[in-house]
Image (spheres, rainbow, N blue to C red):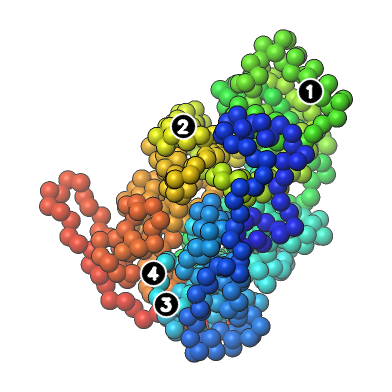
Amino acid sequence: MKWCGWGDETTAFTDVDKPALRPFIREHLGTDIAGATGSPVAFEDVPVPASRLNTQLSDHLTTAVGAEHVSTDAMDRVVHARGKALRDLVRHRAGEVGRLPDCVVRPAGEEQVAAVLAAALESDAVVIPFGGGSNIAGSLEAPPEETRPVISVDMTRMDRVLSIDAEARLAEVQAGALGPELERQLNAQGWTLGHFPDSFAHSTLGGWIATRSSGMQSDKYGDIADLTRGLRAVTPSGTLVVRPVPSTSTGPSVREMILGSEGRLGIITSATVHVHRLPAERVILGYLLPTWEASLAAMREIAASEAHPSVTRVSDPEETQFSFATKKRSGPLDKLQSRALMAFLQRRKGYDLKKMCLAFIGYEGSEGHVKAQRRAVGRIVSRHGGLCIGSGPGELYDQKKFDTPYIRDFLLDREILADVSETAAPWSGLGQVYADATAAARGAFARLGVPGYVMCHLSHSYHSGACLYFTFALVPGAGRVPLEAYDEVKAAIQQAFVDAGATLSHHHAVGTEHARWLEQDISRPGVAMLRALFDGVDPGANLNPGKITGLADGGSERNHGSVHLAEPSRRVVAEPVTRPQTPEPAPAAAATPAPAPQAAPRT
Ligand SMILES: Cc1cc2nc3c(=O)[nH]c(=O)nc-3n(C[C@H](O)[C@H](O)[C@H](O)COP(=O)(O)OP(=O)(O)OC[C@H]3O[C@@H](n4cnc5c(N)ncnc54)[C@H](O)[C@@H]3O)c2cc1C
């Protein structure tokens, strides 16, 4: 993984084979992307503060995992300091690496994880579980003011499929398995998990669970929250075991508490997940629809129908135009076909090409099943004025989807900031969320007086609604602090989500990036419940402090939002809920004495 960018060192985005991209960006962002105008500082010039690991803790960690798996190497510490949010990349590129972990440890099994946590608690150190490091919500960064030693626990040595129960269609997998390795081991036995986030190559099962991830085929397989039945996690009070039962009535779901916990409740060591037999057939078809409104209506009807595709994804007109602009140089025959199609759409179907929307719908299963699904979906799309354009565009999308994220670094090299915000809302509210969020982004561009572009797609359909995924780009220009300009746009979109009744994130989690909107999303008592849970399980605030609900003193909040407790103490149990009808101000939160951290058992 690149230390200040996305993905493999050997892969990079280029516009050389995409002739329409340069004019497209010039038209919409007023910038010429012909050559790089900025570049990251050389790693040798990055100031890397010395590790604060003390000898006693270092010795205990060495005993736990072996000397070769305790690293204080500068590059290792920098790579493990943050995820891949735009904010992370911008600061890393500038050589501002923040509060680095003091060491990276790599346990090989659950016993070693328990020993690492016990050593950390004994020394009152901070532990931050690390999967692939791909999160984009600020879920990995230690609080800048953290004075205790910080240990990054890299889980990727724990990457084995431990067992497959073919009868129950469940597999037990170690939490550090990266997507490709996990699928390789499952595929070898004829199975698949069916979880394919765009970050697949660089993210792990444990990270997916800890952030409530969603993959592109969630329509068929479900989100990671649906796929995860059982799990094991090392916590300050011992090893938590959630049995992989299909359903249970054991009070509030502990399984759900771990899902999305971002390392604040413990270190997930393994999970038992749904697996499916590899499908006999798999196809992704491209469709065109006349407008965004028709596209939303078609997707809603597909979700309500008996058709059950594996992927439903439709781009708004702006994203459709962008997709066409990133198309590779085509041969004369392709060009001819494409011109003929556009002429047909305009003349025979009455399309306004600027309003047209590109969709990808995927099908998996037996030949008969796929045929029936295609027919059912085809009828719905056609009722909404759309048509199928075959498997070519879908195949291309399927092959290229893991490469697209590399464009962000290419744009950063040209001083263009690009990022995403995603949400979910009921079908009845999606149109409004879309209108409000795009207007909010454009309003922010106008306030800043900078060129900007916003586009969106719908993906991950459910019974009652879907996810809307917005991508935006802006050119902050000289004289502006890039991240301040970025914050203006990002905050406007996020605020539009919660104001319109949507969630702050469908699958990118809360971290520190979205924490300021948490109370508006899950209500004040909801935040108080989460704080009570985190503080109760981890009274010393040793586990990834500051994520989701912020630190007690608000110290780690990047956006200076409303998520903070009244008392400047890490050990406050929970903020009292203010009752609106009470005229007197609510009493200040009572600080409780910190219970001594309990060491996890070593066996
Ligand atoms: C280009 C790009 C594309 C993306 N596409 C998608 C997408 O399509 N769908 C999607 O859902 N997300 C996507 N993401 C976001 C990201 O990949 C997810 O949040 C992913 O689930 C993080 O997994 P990870 O293994 O990289 O976790 P990390 O980034 O390493 O960690 C994320 C959080 O989980 C905690 N954690 C990690 N492992 C464990 C463990 N074993 N036990 C306890 N806590 C743990 C960490 O402490 C941290 O709080 C994308 C990100 C990028 C940069």
Q: Please tell me which residue lies in front, 508 or 75.
A: 75
Left or right position of 241 against 15: left
Residue depicted at 42% across the width and 42% down the height: 488
For mark 3, what is the residue?
A: 148
Between disc 1 and disc 2, whose residue precedes?
1
Look at the image and tell me whether residue 311 can be seen: yes
Mark linked to residue 145:
4
Left or right position of 579 against 494: left
Could you tell me residue 499's position as x and y percent? 38, 37
For mark 1, what is the residue?
A: 338
Could you tell me residue 500's position as x and y percent? 41, 34
Crowd class of label 4 (few under 14; some 14 to 19; many from 20; radius 10 Å): few
Q: CA distance from mark 4 to mark 3?
A: 9 Å
Image quarter in which the C terminus is found: bottom right
The amino acid pointed to by label 4 is Glu
State if disc 4 and disc 2 touch (CB < 8 Å).
no
Residue depicted at 75% across the width and 25% down the height: 388
Mark linked to residue 442:
2
Q: Secondary structure at mark 1?
A: helix
The amino acid pointed to by label 1 is Ser
